[in-house]
Amino acid sequence: MQWEPVIGLEIHAQLSTRSKIFSGAPTAYGAEPNTQACLIDLGFPGVLPVLNEEAVRLAVRFGLAIGATVSRRSIFARKNYFYPDLPKGYQISQYEEPVVVGGALEIHPEGGASKRVGITRAHLEEDAGKSLHEDFQGMTGIDLNRAGTPLLEIVSEPDLRSAREAVAYMKALHVLVRYLRICDGNMQEGSFRCDANVSVRPLGEARFGTRTEIKNLNSFRFVERAVQFEIERQIEVLESGGEVVQETRLYDPDRDETRPMRTKEEANDYRYFPDPDLLPLVIPEAMVESERASLPELPEARKARFVGEYGLKEADAMQLAFDRDTADYFEAVAATCGDARLAANWVNGELAAGLNREGLDIACSPVSPERLGGLLRRVADGTISGKIAKQVFERMWTDGEEADAIIEREGLRQITDTGALEALVESVIAANPKQVEQYRAGKTKLLGFFVGQVMKATQGKADPGLVNRLLKERLEA
Amino acid sequence: MSAANAPLHRRSIAELREALAEGRVSAVELVEHFLDRIQRLDRRLNALITVTGEQALTQAREADARRARGQARPLEGIPILHKDIFCTEGVRTSCGSRMLDNFVAPYDAAVVSRLREAGAIMLGKTNMDEFAMGSSNETSWYGPVRNPWDLERVPGGSSGGSAAAVAARLAPAATGTDTGGSIRQPAALCGVTGIKPTYGRVSRWGMIAFASSLDQAGPMAPSAQDCALLLQAMAGFDERDSTAMDEPVPDYAAALERPPDRLRIGLPREWFGDGLDAGVAQVVEAALGVLTELGAELREVSLPSLKLSVPAYYVVAPAEASSNLARYDGVRFGYRCREPRDLHDLYVRTRSEGFGAEVKRRILIGTYALSAGYYEAYYRKAQQIRRLIREDFLRVFAEVDLLAGPTSPTPAFRLGERTRDPVAMYLSDVNTIAVNLAGLPGMSVPAGFSQELPVGLQLVGRDFDEGRLLAVAHRFQQATDWHRRTPSHFD
């Protein structure tokens, strides 16, 4: 039988606010345990939550970016369960009336067709703290620094049909939240993590199969592997006549498998109810409008424009457009040098390699887009060759100098003077009579040898096109 | 006896303010006087959990110095008590529970800091039903409070310690909280005046939550005038409480002196039906007669949804409580069981040992009411009833300016009388609960005695109409002296 996997993802994106969602404590990562938790985060008797307006603003921005409905009125609810890293014994979340409803996201699965994936909802909630099981003999340590950090939980429709699509969706969302500057997307620090709901059904069947939920996947690779494993496991269970049990599972990356965590019967009854400490969240029209007005050009639209306006190849455009800083950098380079394709090649090539080598973010590039543009302008107008440009770029990278200054000082201008080159061509031909004979006998591949000799004599500064032409004329005369 | 030579504990806050202002008494003398009364008399009442004598004396010396510098604030040097539900920095805040017996709050509740900033001096913290769950003060981990009018009877609850202390004049005033009647019912049973303001009038910051959508703090004192002076300091917007209303606070003392305009008083039929003690009915009738003489028009009104208020309340309040009390898990503060074997054992034993029977009962009821499959039938239904009740009140308030009736259907009952029958206990609040469900302001005013036990008259007003309630109570108190009576052993 042919099976069709059905996958939906719930992604938790930590919102980039300075303070927590219901308290004034800072959200910075990596502080000493329990130093960034105030009485509200600690759930002390008598404390009350007050909603952080910035978190709402970021949720609104996300809603607008995916074409969703931003609810003018939404409700915070309490999700009740006991766990030591959940100080109040409940998590403040949204349940029946979330802030963002509907919307969709374009995905580009590797080697597959692009598609639109529906988004059911996105809601605001607070994160829990962390339980540290390793460092304490026979005990568990609790770090509540993360407690109260704002999260946007983004729930997709069950529109994904393979592990590859699942990971493509996660990547597209990762691109988007960083683009919108609502989440730093740092997966090692847990700023962007995922739960996957997976089921399979016979191809053509309309009803869904029984699903399992895989919790806390914090890398693209783990999502792909875990979902793939789970699909195969479920098919195996069904094909051997068994039934899939509705349960929560954990992915073990060391053994590359999912394992049951708790079954439906053991599942918590969260006893959701509206939080009486918080009034309904009413979003003013003005906030929605100001977010709409300041919404950046989104990655998909920007990619399309790069293809249409600059004539870039799809793959190059995507590589540039899907990171906002890279896209901004590229456009600045293109504007300065006047040759977008040249700019694209350099940003995706030399610059990317350099940044990668030194582990730098493009925003911290030692060569500014204006300076790179200045260098490429000299390539575009024929002042220097591409090869020389790479040397100049190296100097710019380490010394921070401008391209023109380096070119002038080092005398790197391309030799385009026909007279000067003709003399060199003459002397090269005179010095290599044997090769001239062979060339004229039909071994035209030797042209490269002659070009190389001329270039060597000019330390690479000769205009290679011109050298080519002059040599050909002289040899074939 | 004129105010000038009456003993300090028989004077109103206004009289004490005057004496302080004229230098006839110092804050230190005042604090010493009441600390002495607490020390001598509270053994019989058990109204206080914690006495903060040294702190109070230090503060009193500062108050006198401040006054000498001409910087006296509105309540400068006036001693008060706080219900032990309000967090007080550096002072144990037990909420009447073993769970918080060792809890020293690291911050002050809004009510506490506001009153301190107005110059009031805290003498100590009053006994209360555990987590404010009770109507008799018998659920306290610190033992029951006794009613100063009859030591074999309860003072009411949950602010029973505050009511008893004020009735016995252990302090000129005290704070209380009211979730279903916890200020008004004990005020009635102890013969003092108490007001539960409109929901959102007073900040809940630092007030340990029982049922967040119903809890509201208010003052308890001998007279409406005293209450007005305290409420003035307590009321007002607080950005730390999202449910606090940004509504200007009127000058309550000035409202007392405003000449009465036409006053239409509604008498809800439902408050005068079955279960109303005959003696209480008589006292209330007489009090209404006084109001008529003062020019009020009385008319019978009906609030048909009122009969659903007790069942609705006993779904909503426990549901919220079950969630609010989840934080008492032995992990970060408060009681922790000895040598827990594992996490489950820590939770189970901490909560089994730390909470008393009534608190556990309500947590169970609330957990059940919110459970999957029951939510619709209980919690959502109760919220719908709540809206109906509020609509009933609003409809009636189109015709009348306030409502009046008995605060409690009976006078103070005997200790132990209702402890074995939770439903009988819950019915003690049958007349007060609906007011919390509707979020309206309500107060209880001493109206007379039935078999030597105090009876309270309940007044209920429109949203933010505390000024009118206080003014009507004040005029009633100018025409009567019930609020001046004190129990004989506590003269």
Image: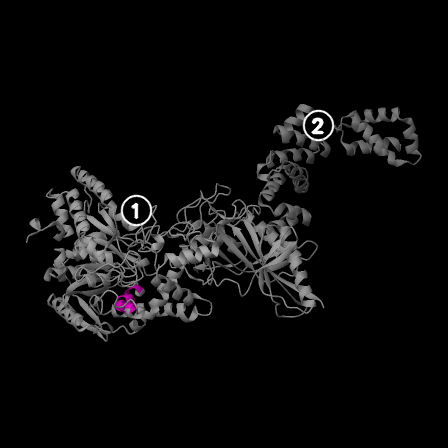
Please give the range of residues in magenta.
Answer: B425-436
Circle 1 — which element?
Answer: loop
User: Residue at coordinates 30% horizontally, 68% vertically from top-left?
Assistant: B420
State the image coordinates of residue B352 (x, y, percent, origin top left).
40, 59
Q: Amino acid at mark 2?
A: Arg
> Horizontal placement of B474 versus B102: left or right?
left
- When the figure is inspected, residue A228 is found, relative to residue B450, above or below; the finding is above
Helix, strand or loop at disc 2? loop
Choose between B224 and A340: the one closer to the eye. B224
Classify mark 2: residues with Cα within 10 Å, few (<14), some (14-19) or many (20+): many
Q: Judge from the rendering whether residue A219 lies leftward or rightward of residue B3; answer left or right.
A: right
Label 2, on which residue? A413
Image mark 2: chain: A
Q: Residues within 10 Å of mark 1 (few under 14, many from 20)?
A: many
Please identify the quadrant where the C terminus of chain B is shown: bottom left
The answer to whether residue A290 is seen in the rendering is no
Q: Position of residue B235 (x, y in %)?
A: 26, 53
Mark pair 2, 1: CA separation: 81 Å
Q: Is residue B302 above or below residue A246?
A: below
> Would residue A315 be found to the left or right of residue A370 on screen?
right
Residue B141 in the magenta stretch? The answer is no
Q: Nearer the viewer, residue A264 or A307?
A: A264
Say yes or no: labels 2 and 1 on the same chain.
no
- Residue B91 image label: 1
